[in-house]
Image (cartoon, rainbow, N blue to C red):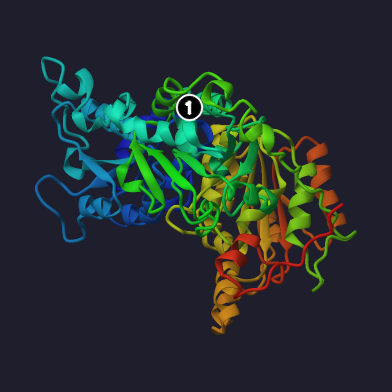
Amino acid sequence: MGNGNAHLISELTSTGFTLVTVRHEAGAVAAADAYYRASGRVGTATVTYGAGFTNTLTALAEASLARIPLVLIVGDAPTTGPRYFDIDQVGMAAAAGVETVRLDEQDPAAQVRDAYARAASGRRPVVVAIPYDLVEVPVRTPAGPSAESAGGSPADGGTAGDAPAEADLEPLVAALRTAERPLLVAGRGVLDSPGGPEAMRNLADRLGALLATSVMARTVAGPEGDLGIAGGFGRLERVEIMRQADVVLVVGASMNPFQMRYGTVFGSEATVLQVDVDPARRHQRTAHFLPADAGTALRALMGRVGASPAENGRADGGWRARQPIPPAPRLAPSEDGLAADGRLDPRAMALALEEILPRERTFVQDGGHFIGWIPLMCSVPDARSHTFVGTAFQSIGLGFPSAVGAAMARPDRTTVLVTGDGGGLMALADLESFVKQARSGVVVVFNDAAYGAELHQYAARGLDERAMLIDEVDFAAVGRTFGAEGIKARSLQDLDALRDWVVRGAEGVFVLDLPISQDVVAEYMAESMAGAVPAPRPLPVD
């Protein structure tokens, strides 16, 4: 709250709107972002002008790159011209790829409705700016309906659901019909498109294809033919199967370096087909690109192929029938959960959390070296139950406020924030916000006393590690000062304190500080280094 939005907030709170508070302006946008990712509903954030707005830019850029629909309402310079401290907020938002709707007194309600329509249909954030000299000016309502209120503008992106042209479909249909080993990969675009998950599974069934997903579309596939997560957070034995595909259809996934396992998730000879609403997202590996909404494109493809593998020339039932999918290995950590250096093994900790945490849970993950442990070891109840923040913009430090947004979106569930110590310290102001507002929450800190990603990428190459190391912090002690429960675990048995909290009803927030080993390196990072770092010492498998 500040000069630029004080009147707006007062009007909203006095008329009964729910106010969710955070301590840092970036957190307001991050919380609105996570609210959408966890619920599928557009969130709203508001900050004041100037420094309040500039503080949002990292979170705003993340939402823009991740294509998250939200509305950010900000104060702005007066219509008479900028004051000495005003900056070009419209230009700064545009540099992050975000459009600004600057209100005037001519039916601002219609302008705001239009902003929400643009955000939702375009799957993007939109800034609504209120000039400071207009906050108390009477609204002039036009006699007739405005263009915006009557039906929106062409910029709404309303063509995303239009059926693809036959000529655009043909290359994809031809490749899928002749594929011996077809693989379909679903991203969040499938989840966000009405009927998208069902259409994805139906098309795979017709082709006898195997399925994989991005982390944010977990559970969209399966159970039949489901290889799990594609890319860096997938299980290696299943990634090896993905690499055998001769035709890969990627729908609504960004194909970022994590999803592509740094370019190694698909075989070099595979034909890659891509469906996305944004042509700018065409990947360099893509042979044929279809600009379309995920659900619309999948239904169109279903209409061009037979109703079963046999009708598509696959009498044997297709690749799915021929290819057994190995079960996930059951890891057997040491009795105390320790790595060779005496600190906790993060894989053993993640495996234990799968069993201890409430089944109805929403994971929220900040960025860092640790981000692969939970997807590998822990299940989720549905596709909106695993939220990654910061990965699109390669940022860290948005975890705590994102957990606030997810907790507001699904208050019926336990919100589990997974963060590193570096990102956790960066976002520490909003640990208090999470503790005060979450009905049921757990904070898991994979605490390696370092910026782990930098340590494993650059210290391993001989760079001086001093700036990569962090004096170890006791996050459980910090959480207790805000009213949370918590412990700093030293062994697997210490997690019994979290188990007891769950048994007692999982009310409030529990902070679990896990001082993990720096010697255990994630598989995806070891692969990205192409041999520059050693592979992690494997846990025994039985």
**Tag 1's secondary structure?**
helix
Residue 242: x %, y % from top left:
59, 47
Q: Residue 202 location, x and y as percent?
A: 54, 23
Q: Which residue is mark 1?
A: 196
Q: Is residue 489 left or right of residue 453?
A: right
The quadrant holding residue 288 is top left
Point out residue 191 in the picture as x, y percentages from the top left corner: 50, 32
The structure residue drawn at horizontal position 45% and vertical position 31%, both measured from the top left corner, is: 192
The residue nearer to you, when weighing 133 against 355, is: 355
Q: Closer to the camera, 465 or 505? A: 465
Q: Is 56 located above or below residue 295 in the figure? A: below
> Which residue shows up at 19% across the image and 28% down it?
153
**Residue under the point 61% across and 39% down:** 438
**446 over 181 or under it: above or below:** below
Viewer-nearest residue: 424 or 132? 424
Q: Position of residue 171 (x, y in %)?
A: 36, 35
**Can residue 182 be seen at all in this image of the molecule?**
yes
Left/right placement of residue 58 relative to residue 345 reads: left
Indicate whether 89 appears above or below 529: above
Residues 210 and 196: in front is 210
Q: Amino acid at mark 1?
A: Gly
